[in-house]
DNA sequence: GCTAAAAATAAAAACGTTTCGATGACTGCA
DNA sequence: TGCAGTCATCGAAACGTTTTTATTTTTAGC
C-alpha cells in the first residue's frame, strides 16, 4: 500500500542504503543521485516508517510532555499555550509529543505508560510537578527539561522566565508614572517563580530608593487566583490610604484586585494603578485592560523542545538553564497617581 | 539494557513465540507455562517494544487527536477535559495519543504530520473542524470519530451530547418554578449543537404549551462568549418586561447575561432566572452559581476512544452515533419568578 | 594513461516483534 | 497397543529501516 524504501530505491535505480543516506542527509551522495532519489521520494510520496526506523536506531521519535492535571484543566490557557509551542516546534524536528497529565501527588502505580515502556527519548515537565517523578525519570537516564519550574538541585535543564526583570520593569514603570508607595500581592509561594517575583519586588524597591512598608507586602497566600487577589486587595484597602499602586504577581490576582477596588467604588487606574504578570487572555479582556508583563508562552514550549532535541543530538548540554526575556505591556490599568495628577 | 522478548524466553525456558502468545493473550498456552512466562516478564520488567511490534503488525499503536487551535486555547477547559478523558482511556487499551491542533481554515500544506506519515491507526476530531480534513482522513481509509460535532453526511462515527434533552430539562425546571415567559440566547449558529439547542427550545416551548414570543428568541449571533451574552441580555431588557427567565445556550453567555442584569441593577435570580449549558468552571465560580446542564466532558472523550478502538478491533461499527446523556444541575441562578413569589 | 586516494554507491546484517507452518506430546477410542 | 485428532510449543520468516563494511567509480597527481 504505502511506499517503502525499496520502492524508492527501485524507482530511482539506486541501492536502498543510498536512499536512506539521502533521506537522512547523511554521508556524501552525488548531486545527481540525490536528485534522482528526491524525485522518486516525491513521486511515491514516501515517508520513512517510524517504527522501522525506531527499531534500528533504538529511538522512539517521541518526547513525553508531562503536566499536572490541575495545570492542564486550569481556566487560563497558560500551559496549553506552552504545549502548543512545543508541539509546533516538534513538527520541524520530526518528533511526536505524547502528552500526559499526572496527579499532584506522586503515585508510583500511576507512572505514565510511555515511561514504563520507554517509549520516549526525553521528557518535558511543565509547571509544578512532583519531585519524585523527576527523580524517577532521571534514574532511567532520560533527558529532562523543566519548563517554568526548577528544582533546588540544579542538575536538570530548565526553561525559565526572567521573573526578576519583569518585576523590575513594572516597578520602574510605576515609578516613572510617579508612584512611590507600592503594594505587592504575591500568591502561592510554593511555586519558585512566585518567590522570585516577591524577592525581586523587595530588591527593586530598595535599589530604586523607594520606601519599603512590610504591611504592603502580601506573600502568604495559598493560591494565586482571582479570589486570592480580591481578598488581598480588600485587606490592603482596610489598612488605609498608604499606597497608590498594586503589583499583583499574576494577572488573575490583578483582576481580583481590580474587582475589589471597583466593588468598593474606587476607579482603576484613577484611584489605584494595578498591574499583573503573565499576559494571559483575561489581561486583555477584563476592564480596564491590564498593564502586565508579557510572557512568551509558545516560545517557552518551543525552546524547551529545541533544547531537548539538542541534548539528544549532542549539540546542547543537559543541566543548562535557559532564561526567556519578558517585556512590559502598557494597557489601561496604570496611570499617574492621583496626587501626582493634582499637583501637575 | 532493557529486556527483550528473547531474554524473557530464555529466563522462562520457552520459545520466543510462546512469550509473544502469553503477552498478547492469544492462542492457547498451558496454565503452567503461562505462569512461568508471566514470572519472567515481571522479573525482568519486560515491556514489548512499540516499534518492533508496529513493524510487524503494521499498526502504529497511536491515535491522532485533532482540535482547532482556538478551541484548544480557549479559556474554558471544555475541550481540554475531553482530551483528558481520551488520554485516560487510551492508557487502558494501550494506545498513545498524538495531539495536534489545526487552523480553522484547511490548508493542505499543514496536514498533521502523523497523517502524512501514516503514524496513527485512527483519528478523533473534536469540536468544529474543517470538513476537508475529515475528507482527507477518510480518503486515507483511517477510522474517524467526531466528538461534539457532526457533518451533514452521516457516514462518520460521532460522539454527541443530548442537546435537545438538556434544553427540555431546563425548560421544565423553569416551568415547574412557575416561569411562563422565557427568553433564549442562542449564540453562534455555525455549530450544529447550537442549532439543536435553539430548535429544542422552540419545540419544548410548544409541546409544553407555553406562549412563544419570537422577540425573545435571539439566535443570530456570531459568537458565544460572555460579551455575546451581555449584549443579548441588554437587547432583551431594552424590549421591556416581557419575560422572567433567560435560557442561554452556554455558560459563558449566561455569565454575560447575569452581568448585564447586575449592571442594570437587577438581581439574579430574584428579578430574572438565568440558566447556562455545559457546566464549565465559571458556572460554579461566577456569582450566583449557575443552574445549568452538566455535560460529562471526560466521558465524551473516553467514549470516543473506546469506540475508535472498537472499530479497529472489529467490535464496533464505523458510522455509529453515540449520544451521551446530560443532566440538570440546580444552583443559585434560578428561582420562582417574582410575581409567583408575591402571589404565593 | 596509470596509480593511489578519495568519493560514491552497494550489499548485508541487525533491530525486536508477530505469525504461520511445523513438530512433538498428549488424549481418547478401537 | 496403535492411531487419529487435538493441543501446546517451537522455529523461522518477515516487517522497513539504519549502519557498517565492502565494492565500485571518480578524481587527482604525475
Image: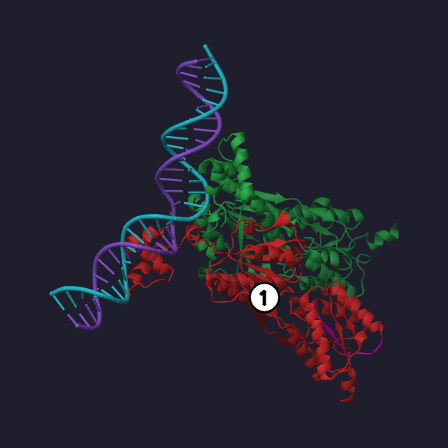
Chain colours: A green, B red, C purple, D cyan
Percent x, y for residue B91? 48, 61
Q: Residue furthest bottom?
A: B344
How many numbered marks are there? Answer: 1
Residue B278 versus residue A185 in the image, above or below = below
Q: Is residue A20 magenta?
A: no
Give me the chain letter of mark 1: B
Residue A36 versus residue A158 in the image, above or below = above
Residue A20 visible in the current orientation: yes
Quadrant in the picture for residue B82: bottom right
At 71% from the left and 48% from the top, the residue drawn is A205
Is residue B31 shown left or right of residue A230? left
Percent x, y for residue A65? 54, 53
Percent x, y for residue B282? 67, 67
Q: Secondary structure at mark 1?
A: strand
Percent x, y for residue B190? 71, 63
At 77% from the left and 48% from the top, the residue drawn is A175
Q: Which residues are magenta?
A: B240-251
Q: Is residue B244 magenta?
A: yes
> Callout 1: 10 Å neighbours few (<14), some, many (20+)?
many
- Image quarter hosting the C terminus of chain B: bottom right
Q: Which residue is mark 1?
A: B158
Residue B276 visible in the current orientation: no
Q: Nearer the viewer, residue B138 or B284?
A: B138
Amino acid at each position: 500500500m504505502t511506499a517503502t524504501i525499496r520502492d524508492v530505491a527501485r524507482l530511482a535505480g539506486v541501492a536502498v542504503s543510498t536512499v536512506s543516506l539521502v533521506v537522512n542527509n547523511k554521508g556524501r551522495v552525488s548531486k545527481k543521485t540525490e536528485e534522482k532519489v528526491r524525485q522518486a521520494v516525491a513521486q511515491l510520496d514516501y515517508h520513512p516508517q517510524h517504527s522501522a526506523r525506531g527499531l534500528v536506531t533504538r529511538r522512539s521519535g517521541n518526547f513525553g510532555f508531562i503536566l499536572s492535571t490541575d495545570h492542564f484543566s486550569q481556566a487560563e490557557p497558560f500551559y496549553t499555550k506552552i504545549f502548543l509551542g512545543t508541539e509546533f516546534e516538534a513538527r520541524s524536528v520530526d518528533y511526536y509529543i505524547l502528552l500526559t497529565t499526572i496527579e499532584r501527588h506522586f503515585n508510583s502505580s500511576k507512572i505514565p505508560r510511555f515511561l514504563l515502556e520507554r517509549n520516549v527519548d526525553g521528557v518535558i515537565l511543565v509547571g509544578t510537578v512532583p519531585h519524585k517523578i523527576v527523580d524517577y525519570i532521571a534514574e532511567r537516564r532520560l533527558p529532562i527539561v523543566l519548563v517554568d519550574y526548577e528544582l533546588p538541585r540544579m542538575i536538570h535543564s530548565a526553561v525559565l522566565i526572567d521573573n526578576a526583570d519583569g518585576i523590575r520593569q513594572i516597578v520602574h514603570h510605576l515609578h516613572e508614572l510617579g508612584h512611590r508607595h507600592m503594594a505587592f500581592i504575591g500568591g502561592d509561594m510554593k511555586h519558585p517563580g512566585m518567590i522570585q517575583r516577591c524577592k525581586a519586588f523587595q530588591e527593586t524597591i530598595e535599589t530604586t530608593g523607594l520606601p519599603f512598608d512590610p504591611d504592603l507586602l502580601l506573600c502568604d497566600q495559598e493560591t494565586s487566583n482571582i479570589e486570592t487577589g480580591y481578598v488581598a486587595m480588600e485587606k490592603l484597602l482596610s489598612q488605609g490610604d498608604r499606597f497608590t499602586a498594586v503589583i499583583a504577581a499574576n494577572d488573575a490576582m490583578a483582576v481580583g484586585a481590580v474587582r475589589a477596588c471597583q466593588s468598593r467604588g474606587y476607579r482603576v487606574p484613577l484611584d489605584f494603578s494595578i498591574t499583573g504578570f503573565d499576559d494571559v487572555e483575561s489581561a486583555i479582556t477584563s476592564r480596564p485592560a491590564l498593564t502586565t508583563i508579557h510572557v512568551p508562552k509558545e516560545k517557552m514550549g518551543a525552546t524547551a523542545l529545541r533544547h531537548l532535541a539538542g541534548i539528544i543530538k549532542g549539540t546542547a548540554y543537559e543541566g543548562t538553564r535557559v532564561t526567556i526575556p519578558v517585556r512590559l505591556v502598557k494597557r489601561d490599568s496604570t496611570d499617574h497617581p492621583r496626587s501626582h495628577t493634582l499637583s501637575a
